Amino acid sequence: MLDITLIKLMKHRDEYYKLIKAIPMTAMDAKTQELINDFGKYFKKFPTHKVVQIEIFLPRFKAWHPTMSDDTFNAYVGVLRASSSEVDDATKAGILSDLYELDMGTKLANAFSQFDAGSLKTPLIEIITDIVSKYKDSIGTKTVQWIDTSIDVLLSEVSNNKGLKWRLDVLNTHMRPLRGGDFGILASRPDRGKTTMVASEITTMAKQLPNNKNAIWLNNEGPGKRLIPRIYQSALGCTVSELIAKNKAGTLKAEYIKAIGRIDKVRVVDIHGMGTSEITDILDNSNPGFVVADMLDHISGFRDMNRTDLQVEELYKWFRDKAVEKDCPILGTSQISGSGEGLMFPTMDMLKDSRTGKQGACDFIMMIGSSGDPGLQYARYISLPKNKLKLEGQNSDPRSEVKINPDINRYEDITE
């Protein structure tokens, strides 16, 4: 009875990604395990489907198991037909509670076994506390935690200018360094150097991170593999021809590691078609120290809302919460609407598909402006129409000209 009810839950995308790690698969019968595993394949193949559509699923299920007999296939069909109805809230709550409790018990048992074997690398009490805390979060019982960070520590962060600094000094002059929980927006018109800015700054941020932290580039535009050479260019300040020469000489990787610390410290993850549940999974397994969500607007998760601006507002609030939860800065990229075309300093109301939602969800908004003058094709104009990270004694908005250097995939300050 539980298996059919579980299948009824798992056919929904949101429930699938919430529960897949908590389900004790070995306790399920073979048919349930097979269907749940293939639901995962289905959701990856149809990233916009919120629920498994049986008529679409069945032919693919058959193709995924070509040696399956007709009798066995018909048995699966019967299970799926029986799961066509929905689960009432009371039954759902009971099943979820049982699953979360069983998951907690399994993890605690594993921890005790490792403790007895002397193989634990983390103190047992820390592991138990973490397991129980996550169980309470899952069932909605959260411990109230008040902020007890000493004022001495907080003031020390300010006086020591602690955090991640930008490659562009014009930004460092007008903003304090980025710290955990900061969420900002980087926006430009299409094909005006947004990707170059991301590559230029993410490589700068990466080399400042502790060696166990990573800079994560969530890529939602073209193929992520095309970004890798640009990241190498930015990190080393080299042209493509120079990269090729260094690679032939066998020095490229060593120079790159020296520049940012590790070969995989900047990690590009393609997220095309993914939603917030998959993004959560990526961040949970990436130990992020700095995250870029590019393009943030294309990520699904709140598509059931009636207005585009409301969808976008909830998505940006969600990323703001993730910046706090993961204790790392997150930079989301967006576009400037057509009204900002050819403007050096677009205003923040020109953010695409937003009334006030994006603006209210972030700590800062960084605009990349440009001119339509052919003689200024490499000139870019940096403004901060919103800047809650303003440094004492400085203007909040620099409105400064900088230079884009596409040959080495960097932005550069203009020095007198």
Image (cartoon, helix red, strand yellow):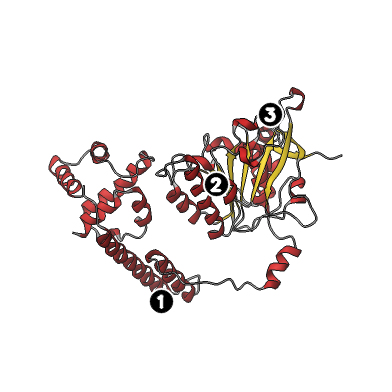
Mark 1: amino acid: Asp
Q: In this picture, is 286 found above or below 147?
A: above
The answer to whether residue 264 shows anywhere in this view is no
Residue drawn 49% across the image and 39% down it: 298
Q: Amino acid at mark 3?
A: Gly
**CA gap, disc 1 and disc 3:** 67 Å
Name the mark on residue 357.
2
**Is 134 situated left or right of 401 in this image?**
left
Query: In terms of sequence position, does the residue under pointer 1 or pointer 2 come before the other?
Result: 1
User: Disc 2 versus disc 3: distance between alpha carbons?
Assistant: 24 Å
Label 2: which secondary element: helix
Residue furthest to the left in view is 71
- When the figure is inspected, residue 241 is found, relative to residue 303, above or below; the finding is above
| Amino acid at pointer 2 | Gly
Q: Mark 3 sits on what residue?
A: 342
Q: Distance of mark 1 from mark 2, alpha carbons?
A: 52 Å
Please say if the residues under marks 1 and 3 sit with CB atoms less than 8 Å apart: no
Residue 176 visible (yes or no): yes
Residue 214 marker: none
Pointer 3: residues within 10 angstroms few (<14), some, or many (20+)? some
Where in the figure is residue 332, as x and y percent of width and height? 58, 45
Q: Residues within 10 Å of mark 2 (few under 14, many from 20)?
A: some
Name which residue lies at 53% across and 60% down: 325
Q: Is residue 133 left or right of residue 205?
A: left
Q: Indicate which label's residue lies in the foreground, 1 or 3.
A: 3
Numbered mark located on residue 116 in the image: 1
SS at mark 3 in the image: loop
Quadrant occupied by the C terminus: top right
Residue drawn at (68%, 45%), measured in percent from left and top? 385
Q: Is residue 164 left or right of residue 335?
A: right
Badge 1 or badge 3: first in the primary sequence: 1
Residue 268 lies, in percent from the top left, at: 55, 44
